[in-house]
Amino acid sequence: MKIIYLHQYYTDPSMSGGTRSYEMARRLVMNGHEVHFITSWRSDTPHKNWFVTEESGFTVHWLPVSYSNHMNFNQRLKAFLHYAVKAGPRARQIGGDVIFATSTPLTIAIPGVFASQKLNVPMVFEVRDLWPEIPIAFGILKNPLFVFASRWLERYAYRHAERIIALSPGMKEGVVNAGYPADRIKVIPNGADLYSFGPDKRDSSRFFADKPELINKRLIVYGGTFGLINGVSYAVEMATHLANIAPDVAVVLVGDGVEKEKVTNLAKQKNLLNHNVFIYPQVSKSEMPHLLASADIALSLFVNLEAMWSNSANKFFDGLASGTAIAINYGGWQAELLQKEECGIVLSAFDHERAATQISDFLSNEIRLKSAAVSARALAAKSFSRDLLAVEFETVLNEAIKGNRKNDKTIN
């Protein structure tokens, strides 16, 4: 089949961020399918319009649209709409057997539905986050008109999707609550890259060779976005108490985002920066295995907001794949999984002192720590292997083509 893959913020391993789409596409091509990505180029480029690259057997169509985590809401909305308007006609021009549109942003539904209708082919819609619930709950989306438009767009996307893929059970529940049939939703979470994060592929010296300040430290590593919803300040507050009870423990924060300056300033104010809190620039996905190679604990964080409990954080699955014990500060299905499989700990969401004690106690129990690391890798192989999830992904696309309702006049 020929697949039009709409993903506004597609990344490959040379970039920072999740590579789910890249990994799925690579496996689809290996199985004989043709894949065309329609995405955006966020950095500076001499190109003024669409340009094309070939990667790992598939084609990537790039539209220059400036974007960064430092943008405000209006700037982001402008970027979303610019891509949405241009991507639909591009997809129609390329043509295909199925349209696959992955959020966020939710505006990906606009070109997805447009191309699906013009080409008379089914659309599969992927829900990566429960939008607009999250920005509404977080207070980012307040304007009643925007709230109404976002909820309408959510229903619009679901109504025109032949199948839906949700990245967690909670996301599936949210889609069902919006009125979509449960039997046409498949849960396919973010996956673990077992090969890239394998023991023979990781080299701690790649990241830590020029960082003598980390020698002889026990490392708690956060690698990801410093965004509003991530609440990375939590790690600094926790480090305040770790400095007293576990001075050999270092909190390593690697990434970028709108909150990075705030987090850095907080560490300075508490006299922790470059003492037991170390902050470094973001790294590419291909560097993540090396970053986690020397980590005692991989950290995944979110602000204390129940709407975030349904997330499917890349950091969580990278930790599993690398065979690293994981610590998170939120509830939901990932917390339940950590506790059931005994591959990490769930930190107190409110009490930073309590969280520091949890970390210290966990690190002091070498048997438990090593067991958690082994369990993490085993869970990755058992339940979240990219190879296994890609088979399910391909099946959903085939089912969408076979069950195409485009010619059913009763569907509105």
Image (tube, rainbow, N blue to C red):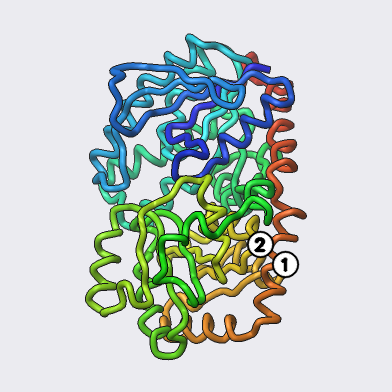
- Residue 315, how many percent across, how many down? 53, 56
* Amino acid type of the residue tagged 1 in the rendering: Val
Query: Which quarter of the image is occupied by the C terminus?
Result: top right
Of the residues under marks 2 and 1, which one precedes in the sequence? 2
Which image quadrant for residue 236?
Answer: bottom left
Q: Is residue 83 above or below residue 22?
A: above
Q: CA distance from mark 2 to mark 1?
A: 6 Å
Residue for point 41% across, 41% down:
151
The residue located at (45%, 20%) in the rendering is 61
Is residue 345 visible in the rendered image? The answer is yes
Answer left or right for 296 relative to 243. Answer: right
Nearest the eye: 202 or 113: 202
Q: Amino acid at mark 2?
A: Gly
Residues at badges 2 and 1 in contact (C-beta under 8 Å)? yes
Direction from residue 263 to residue 104 in the image, left or right? right
In percent of the image, x 42 and y 82: which residue is there? 351
Q: Position of residue 22 (x, y in %)?
A: 57, 34
The residue that disc 2 covers is 323
Residue 352 horizontal/vertical position (percent): 41, 81
The residue labelled by disc 1 is 374
Q: Quadrant of the N terminus?
A: top right
Within 10 Å of the Cα at label 1, are there few (<14), some (14-19), or many (20+) other Cα atoms? some
Local crowd size for mark 2, using a 10 Å CA cut-off: few (<14), some (14–19), many (≥20): many
With respect to residue 267, does 306 lie above or below? above
Between 373 and 203, which is closer to the camera in this rendering? Answer: 203
The residue under the point 62% across, 62% down is 333
Question: Mark 1 falls on what kind of element?
Answer: helix
Q: Which label was assigned to residue 108?
A: none
> Residue pushed farthest bottom?
245
